Image (cartoon, rainbow, N blue to C red):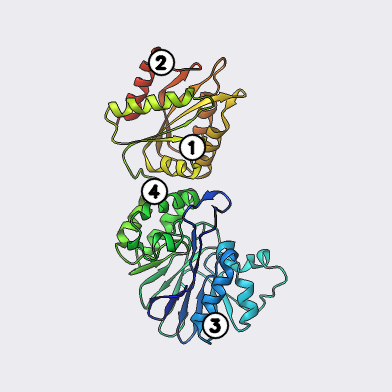
Amino acid sequence: MTRTVYKDVLYIGADDTALDLFESQYAVPEGMAYNSYLILDDKVAIMDTIDPRAGEQWKENLSEALSGRTPDYLVVQHLEPDHSSLIAYVMETYPGAKIVATAKAVSMLGQFFSGVSFEGRTLAVKEGDTLGLGHHTLKFIAAPMVHWPEVMVSYDMENGVLFSADAFGKFGALSKCGFWGEEDSDWACEGRRYYFNICGKYGIQVQNLLKKASALDINMILPLHGPLLRENLGYYVGLYNTWSTYAPESEGVFVAYASIHGGTKAVAEKFAEILKAKGAVKVSLCDLTRDDQAEAVEDAFRYPVTVVAACSYDAGLFPPAHSFIHHLQDKGWQKRKVGLIENGSWAPSAGRVMKEMFSTMKAVEIVEPMVTIKSRMKESDIPALEALADAVLAK
């Protein structure tokens, strides 16, 4: 579809409602939006392309929006294939068009498009450079590692619009979650899962971008995924500030368990009951063997305390729990308290492995006591669970 975003700027992106896994790992039951924009001024600029899965629709949208005109520039803010796969098509179809990107992105073009000559057809820009289109002037702002090293964002100085690349994106097709942010009743839910799994490791870099953005008069944010944002921008920026400083967003305790035969599950459910009885504001319970790992990572970042209950396995840790903690390591999980519950029938080992893994993380406090269950929870185990609950709830 094409749609007017604001004067002289059209939306030419496309939805993919058939996609099951974004980046081949994140479940997207509501599909995915690949956003792209066209600025029709004295000069014409395409703002990024999209994923090849929706490439034919994008080509139709581009042709319709151009209405016979030809693009002068293709601004490449992010070279990841879901935003750049149609670069070769643009180069071949519009031989007068020039790619505008960071020097890092220009140097990487050949990695993705072998056999395509870019000689004389690129314009490398850096922090603070501008590109005049007529009424619109784009100012380029470096945003390395949000979430690749070549990323930049673009600011339309005439209208106060920030083309934000992957920042402020979310999972979900626009046909499912709404074209504008105000149409999306629960933007934060999938926005949070998207942020922590895509950009979570790069909090410092996101903070750097937010500081640069704070000096701009922004009226609208146009991301490369998810709804376009034009109202209550302070809400979205506030969430990004919280997320990128690794501060907990909500009060509560996240209890994640990995159980083989149900014994550890029973312990986790009992522990959740104990927490609630002791006044926990919120207890979120997750089965790491069946629930979405990306949602588990999201909740671990959302709450100030995580408790992992897992069984021992092959003298180590049950793989679903190991995978979860490894994901937290990869995403830079930090500034949290963690409680541990291990289960083992003859030689409990889960606790040792979990302690080793969590000890590698920045400012993560392992709360004592660690609780050890032998096969099945017994009445004699309750005092230890009570003590752990008191410790994780302590301010």
The crowding category of the residue bearing disc 3, from other C-alpha atoms within 10 Å (few below 14, some 14 to 19, many at least 20), is some
Q: Which mark is residue 245?
A: 4
The numbered mark, 1 or 2, whose residue comes first in the sequence reads: 1
The numbered mark, 2 or 4, whose residue comes first in the sequence reads: 4
Query: Disc 2 residue type?
Result: Asp
Q: Residue furthest top?
A: 380
The crowding category of the residue bearing disc 4, from other C-alpha atoms within 10 Å (few below 14, some 14 to 19, many at least 20), is some
Can you tell which of label 2 and label 4 is closer to the viewer?
2
Say which residue appears at 58% left-offset and 79% top-offset.
98
Task: Measure the C-alpha gap from mark 2 to mark 3.
Answer: 71 Å
Say which residue appears at 48% left-offset and 67% top-offset.
35
State whether residue 213 appears in this view.
yes
Rendered-image quadrant of the C terminus: top left
Query: Disc 3 residue type?
Result: Asp
Pointer 1: what residue? 361
Q: Which mark is residue 72?
A: 3
**Relative horizontal placement of residue 142, taking residue 277 as reference (left or right):** right
Helix, strand, or loop for circle 4? loop
* Foreground pick, 69 / 241: 69
Can you tell which of label 3 and label 4 is closer to the viewer?
3
**Relative horizontal placement of residue 364, taking residue 349 as reference (left or right):** left
Can you tell which of label 1 and label 2 is closer to the viewer?
2
Kindly indicate whether the residue at mark 2 contacts the one at mark 1 (C-beta within 8 angstroms): no
Helix, strand, or loop for circle 3? loop
**Relative horizontal placement of residue 150, taking residue 287 as reference (left or right):** right
Give the x, y percent position of residue 309.
Answer: 46, 28
Give the x, y percent position of residue 112.
Answer: 66, 64
Task: Measure the C-alpha gap from mark 1 to mark 2.
Answer: 29 Å
Task: Measure the C-alpha gap from mark 4 to mark 1.
Answer: 15 Å
Q: Which mark is residue 381?
A: 2
State whether residue 104 appears in this view.
no
Task: Measure the C-alpha gap from mark 3 to mark 4.
Answer: 39 Å
